Structure formats: structure tokens, C-alpha cells
């Protein structure tokens, strides 16, 4: 235990004083790479050169916007090397990216690479321009010290198929031989571990340690350094102080607003908005939404109308469609909020509606358009007289109760229906199982895995009440799901019935790996017996007379 604590202390000291990623120099092409390029694209011969006309020398007019090489040299600009050189320890962690990724993802990966001492690897130049590539990378890195390199063969050596991909070499020689290429021997899977996907660096390292335990001695120090650097960055952050309480700020804002009412109301008229507000109209198409029974139908129509549009940001008419397309195509960037009946937004709104004057103050004397009117309506009285006469007589009649038993598909709460299984991996120690049980007005879906050796429950995946009744068709419906730092799965089910039997199908989908497994089970529908009571009332006429 003391040795483990000392190791963490050393990493903390390395990050806090200061927490800086070690940057290195660029990995330039080797002589073998140059020879291969010359063979693929040979230089022209003397006869071909002599047949070409001699062009006139260009006129070069220096512009102020051109790149100042001397200024770059004065600012000590360096292309940092991500490769291993003599006397420099190799970098075990590489992050393979492309400059076409979203800017927010690139900024996050650059910051994480700086904290973890990782290397950013590009496949090639942006738009075949070194100047443009250096400008984009320089803007991303800023003042941080982050190593980056352009190495297209590294994508092949490490079998990189998508970006971002996190690659951790398992020894100091794997993938650091600049002279090797996939023509002379690629890195084998045993020499490195990788995780692909738009995830954070700490999640990728934890996933590598779970999948490849032998990578823990290489990954754990990087993870500790990354986490401690994050803590140090938070500790050095200065938070702004509030000099006043919330109530003081509210009172000052209310006072300031009232002071401007007199000046503002004189500027409000039917023509003011049209002359000062850009693109103002008195009849916007959204006005038709007011008073409609719901917004679902017009919202769906608007989404369909905007789908596949040009989305020109500079045109006002396209800005609404831009927002709608963004909300539909970027679900991971749309935060979900759960608003309950006790949410402050609703409770305070009800308070304002009940007594707005207590919150906003009295509007009397501020805006002459608001006046108090009292309307009194006189009471209305009306006298109605009716007469009812009844005669006495003795009559008899019969009421016959007819009880009819009816057998229908149904089950009682807690009654087991069926089990759906799927075994996508015959060599694995367990297989997927889903138990479906009747609820009060639904099904209880229980997802788990069964150990092949014992037949017992191996791993719980969760239980959830889902919509479902017997003898009905149910489309693909979500079941228990978990997507977090440890689990990544979603389950779905469907039901189809024919005659006295029903079939329930179940899916297990892993969105993080893009895999899906399916199983189906057919079972005989259980039935329940109910009784229908029908009265043959032969006394209806007499009962009507007695009223």
C-alpha cells in the first residue's frame, strides 16, 4: 500500500507543478518512405524536361496578409514531434483524429491530450495544404503543449477505421519504429489496445483496462495523471463572487424596469415594431398555432418541410429551419429536462398568476391602458310551479338475471407468460434471457443473462414495466436500458398474435459497439373466465309509471 500511495503522490506532483503535457518533435518521412514515393511517382526524364516551354518568372507582390516567416521564428513556433527519438521516451498513447470532426470534439480531445501527454495523429493534410493544416492545428492547440504528427501509415499499422480512435501501445517498441511500414510488417493486435468512438479519454482508458488487463501498467499512470491534472485545473480556477443577494438583485432590477416604463410606453405603437425590428410582420405563420388543440401536427409538418433544406445561415428565412434540423439531427446535443408538477417553474408561475401585483408591483400610474372596472349584475329570480299526480294500484312483474360465462385471453398480475432467449456467442459463459410477466395493465420485462454451467442468473440487466396486453399487436418498444460509464445497452421487444398463440421477440442492442442480438418465443395465451350479467327487465313500464 505505501508504494501505491507514493506512486500516486509522484503523479500528482508531476501534474500540479505544473500540469503540462510533454510535447515532442515531428516524425519526418524516412529514406525508405521517400524511395517508395519516388517509385510511385518517378521524376521526368531529360527528354521530357527539354520539350517543355520555359515559363516566365512570376511577379511576386508581397501582401500584408501573407505569412511572416520571420515573425513565426521570433514567436518560437515549433512543430512538436510525436515520435520516439534518441534520449526521448516513446509516447504510449495516441489519439487518431481528423480535422473534419466537430469543432467541439476536437477542442475536447486537444485539452485531454494536453492533460494526459497523448499524441494527436492525423492521416494527411487538410485540403492538401500544409499551411492550412498548421493554421487549424495551431488554432486548436493555442497555448497548450500538445504533440501532434501527420502519419498516414500509422492508421494502417494500428488498424484505425474511424475517428476518434484511442490507441495504447503495450511496450516501448510497438509502433515507434519509424522505418517500419505495413509493407514490411504491421503491428499485431497483441502489441496494442484500442477503443474507437466519440468518448472521453478517461472512459477509453478504463475500457482498455477492462478489455485488456495486461494494459493496466501502461494505462493506469496515464489515467491518474489525466484525473489529477483535471483536479489541479479546477483548484486553480477562480470563481466570481456575488456582492449582493438574489433578493437585492431582483429589487434593483424591478426598480430599474419601472423607471423606464414612462419613457418606453411612449415609443410603443402599431408602426414602431415594423419600422425598427428586422423582418417584423403582423401576420407570422406561427400565429395559426394559437388556440389549436395541440402542437404535434404542425410540429411534424414543419420538420418535414425543413428536412433536406439548404440551411443557408445568412438568410433570415432559413434560420428557423436551421434550428429545426439541428434539433432533429443532433439528439445527443439536446439536453433532456424532467419537469414535474412541483417544479419551481410551475409553482412560481401559479403564484404569479394568482397575484401578479404581489410579484411585479402595481401597474396603476405606470401604464394608462390598464384600468380597474367593476361590473355588477342584478340578481334574477324566477318561480316555477309543477303538479304531479299518482294513483295506487297493485301489479306484478318479473326481473330475470341471465348470467353468461365468457372465456377471453387474459392473465392475473404476477402470472408468468414466457421466456425469450438469445445465444449470440456459443463460446461465451452465459446467454441472454428476457422473462415476461403479466402486470395490472401491462407487462413486466426482466432482462438478464443465464450462466450456461449452472443455469442460474449470471448478470442482472434490469426490469421495467412496459406496455402490453394479450391478443394485441405491439411494435418495437423500448425495454430496460443503461448507457453510462460501465454499461452500454438498449433492449426492445415486440408482440404478434394469431389464433390462440402469441409470439414475443426481444432485441439486445449495444449502441457503443453497433451490435444487436434477437430472440423470439411463441406461447399459448392464458385465458380468464368472466361472467356477463344481463337483466331481462319486464318491469320497466311499471317502474317508469312509479316515478
Image: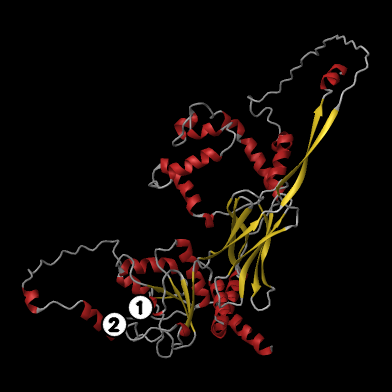
Q: Is residue 277 visible?
A: yes
Looking at the picture, tell me which residue is in the foreground, 99 or 256: 99
The structure residue drawn at horizontal position 45% and vertical position 47%, both measured from the top left corner, is: 322
Residue 60 vertical position relative to residue 369 in the rendered view, above or below: below
Q: Are marks 1 and 2 in contact (CB under 8 Å)?
A: yes
Query: Residue 495, how many percent across, how many down?
Result: 60, 54
Query: Residue 60, how many percent across, how many down?
Result: 19, 64
- The image quadrant where one finds the N terminus is bottom right
Query: In the rendered picture of this protein, how many numbered marks are placed on residues?
Result: 2
Query: Residue 254, how many percent across, how many down?
Result: 66, 40
Residue 355 left/right relative to 188 = right
Mark number, residue 153: 1
Residue 356 left/right relative to 286 = right
Label 2 sits on a secondary structure element that is: helix
The structure residue drawn at horizontal position 58% and vertical position 81%, both measured from the top left corner, is: 220
- The image quadrant where one finds the C terminus is top right
Marks 1 and 2 sit apart, C-alpha to C-alpha, by: 10 Å
Judging by the rendered image, the residue that carries numbered circle 2 is 33
Amino acid at each position: 500500500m505505501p508504494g501505491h500511495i507514493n506512486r500516486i503522490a509522484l503523479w500528482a506532483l508531476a501534474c500540479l507543478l505544473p500540469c503540462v503535457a510533454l510535447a515532442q518533435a515531428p516524425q519526418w518521412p524516412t529514406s525508405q518512405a521517400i524511395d517508395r514515393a519516388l517509385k510511385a511517382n518517378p521524376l521526368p526524364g531529360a527528354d521530357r524536361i527539354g520539350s517543355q516551354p520555359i515559363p516566365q518568372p512570376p511577379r511576386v507582390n508581397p501582401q500584408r496578409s501573407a505569412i511572416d516567416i520571420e515573425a513565426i521564428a521570433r514567436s518560437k513556433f515549433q512543430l512538436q514531434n510525436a515520435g520516439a527519438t534518441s534520449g526521448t521516451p516513446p509516447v504510449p498513447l495516441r489519439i487518431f483524429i481528423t480535422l473534419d470532426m466537430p469543432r467541439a470534439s476536437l477542442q475536447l480531445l486537444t485539452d485531454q491530450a494536453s492533460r494526459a501527454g497523448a499524441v494527436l495523429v492525423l492521416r494527411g493534410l487538410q485540403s492538401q495544404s500544409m499551411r492550412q493544416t498548421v493554421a487549424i492545428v495551431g488554432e486548436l492547440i493555442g497555448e497548450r503543449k500538445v504533440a501532434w504528427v501527420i502519419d498516414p501509415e500509422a492508421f494502417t499499422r494500428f488498424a484505425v477505421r474511424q475517428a476518434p480512435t484511442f490507441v495504447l501501445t503495450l511496450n516501448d517498441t510497438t509502433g515507434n519504429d519509424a522505418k517500419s511500414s505495413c509493407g514490411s510488417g504491421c503491428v499485431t493486435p497483441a502489441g496494442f489496445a484500442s477503443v474507437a468512438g466519440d468518448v472521453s479519454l478517461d472512459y477509453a482508458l478504463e475500457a482498455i483496462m477492462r478489455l485488456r488487463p495486461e494494459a493496466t501498467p501502461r494505462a493506469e499512470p496515464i489515467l491518474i495523471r489525466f484525473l489529477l491534472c483535471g483536479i489541479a485545473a479546477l483548484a486553480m480556477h477562480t470563481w466570481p463572487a456575488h456582492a449582493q443577494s438574489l433578493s437585492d438583485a431582483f429589487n434593483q432590477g424591478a426598480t430599474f424596469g419601472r423607471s423606464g416604463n414612462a419613457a418606453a410606453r411612449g415609443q410603443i405603437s402599431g408602426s414602431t415594431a415594423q419600422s425598427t425590428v428586422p423582418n417584423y410582420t403582423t401576420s407570422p405563420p406561427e400565429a395559426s398555432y394559437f388556440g389549436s388543440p395541440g402542437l404535434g401536427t404542425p410540429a411534424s409538418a414543419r420538420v418535414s418541410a425543413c428536412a433536406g433544406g439548404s440551411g443557408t445561415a445568412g438568410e433570415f428565412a432559413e434560420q428557423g429551419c436551421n434550428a429545426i434540423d439541428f434539433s432533429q439531427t443532433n439528439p445527443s446535443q439536446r439536453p433532456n429536462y424532467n419537469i414535474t408538477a412541483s417544479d419551481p417553474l410551475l409553482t412560481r408561475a401559479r403564484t404569479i398568476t394568482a397575484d401578479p401585483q404581489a410579484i411585479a408591483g402595481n401597474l396603476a400610474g405606470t401604464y394608462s391602458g390598464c384600468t380597474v372596472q367593476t361590473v355588477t349584475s342584478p340578481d334574477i329570480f324566477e318561480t316555477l310551479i309543477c303538479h304531479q299526480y299518482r294513483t295506487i294500484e297493485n301489479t306484478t312483474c318479473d326481473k330475470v338475471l341471465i348470467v353468461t360465462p365468457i372465456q377471453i385471453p387474459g392473465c392475473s398480475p404476477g402470472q408468468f407468460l414466457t421466456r425469450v432467449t438469445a445465444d449470440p456467442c456459443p463460446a461465451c459463459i452465459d446467454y441472454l434471457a428476457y422473462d415476461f410477466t403479466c402486470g395490472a395493465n401491462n407487462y413486466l420485462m426482466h432482462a438478464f443473462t443465464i450462466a450456461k454451467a449452472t443455469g442460474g442468473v449470471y448478470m442482472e440487466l434490469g426490469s421495467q414495466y412496459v406496455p402490453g396486453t394479450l391478443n394485441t399487436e405491439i411494435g418495437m418498444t423500448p425495454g430496460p436500458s443503461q448507457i453510462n460509464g460501465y454499461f452500454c445497452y438498449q433492449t426492445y421487444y415486440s408482440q404478434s398474435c394469431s389464433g390462440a398463440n402469441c409470439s414475443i421477440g426481444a432485441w439486445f442492442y449495444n449502441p457503443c459497439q453497433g451490435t444487436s442480438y434477437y430472440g423470439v418465443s411463441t406461447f399459448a395465451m392464458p385465458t380468464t373466465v368472466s361472467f356477463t350479467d344481463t337483466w331481462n327487465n319486464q318491469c320497466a313500464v311499471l317502474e317508469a309509471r312509479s316515478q
